[in-house]
Image (cartoon, helix red, strand yellow):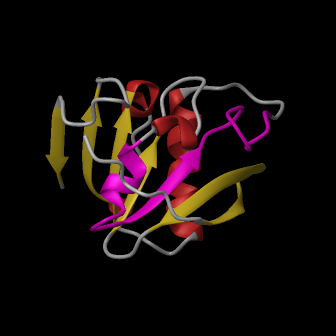
Amino acid sequence: MSSIPREQPESGYAPVNGLSMYYEIHGTGRPLVALHGAFHTVAAMGPIVPALAQTRQVIGVELQGHGHTADIDRPLSYEQMADDIAALIRHLDIAPADVFGYSMGVGSPCSSPSDIRSWCASRCSPRSPTRTTACIPS
């Protein structure tokens, strides 16, 4: 398998719901928010992000208590992560955005349906990005 080069992304922190959420932007095109699995980071998604960034603007997110995004004093729940993702989409002004998640990222759908165009979920390993379990266009 040929290696896809990983270019230096634009990155930053977005103030969302009392959290300073880290994100990276890779590529150009229609926005696609990429959500990692539990205890992972954008970098841990392996070849998924650079492969998707060949045709899309991929916004890799690090959720509460993961990677560059610090934990804060509030419960960590799918509902809260969904609210955070929706707030990030609004902060970056990319609504409606497509969303891709695997593992824990599958359980973090946006709480605001107007913020997402479609949702694609995978339960495969980030090393095997072709096995998709569900894609739901809005």
In-front residue for pair 1/88: 1
Look at 58% across and 59% down and name the residue there: 24
**Vertical side of 22 occupied by 56: above or below:** below
Quadrant that contains the N terminus: top left
Q: Quadrant of residue 108?
A: top left
Q: Can residue 17 be spotted in the picture? A: no
Q: In this image, 119 relative to 81: left or right?
A: left
Asked whether, in this view, residue 37 is left or right of residue 39, the answer is left
Please identify the residue farthest to the front as the structure is shown.
2
- Provide residue 112's location: percent of width, then percent of height: 41, 53
Q: Quadrant of residue 131?
A: top left
Which residue is painted at 48% across and 28% down in the image? 37
**Residue 116, position as x, y percentages in the image:** 33, 58
In the rendering, at what x and y percent does residue 13 appear? 72, 60
Residue 4 visible (yes or no): yes
Q: Does the magenta stretch include residue 57?
A: yes
* Placement of the C terminus among the 4 image quadrants: bottom left
Tag count:
0
| 34 relative to 95, above or below | above
Lateral position of residue 80 relative to residue 82, left or right: right
Q: Where is residue 133 in the image (x, y as percent from the top left)?
A: 17, 28
Instruction: Please name the residue shown 40% across and 69% down the image.
Output: 95
Where does the magenta region start and end? 47-71
**Residue nearest the observer in this picture, 8 or 112:** 8
Residue 68 lies in the magenta-colored region: yes
Please give the name of the residue rendered at 43% of the width and 33% of the height, measured from the top-left corner.
Answer: 105
Classify 85 as above or below 80: below
Relative depth, front residue between 128 and 63: 128
In the visual, does 122 lie left or right of 126? left
In the current view of this chain or complex, which residue is farthest to the right? 73
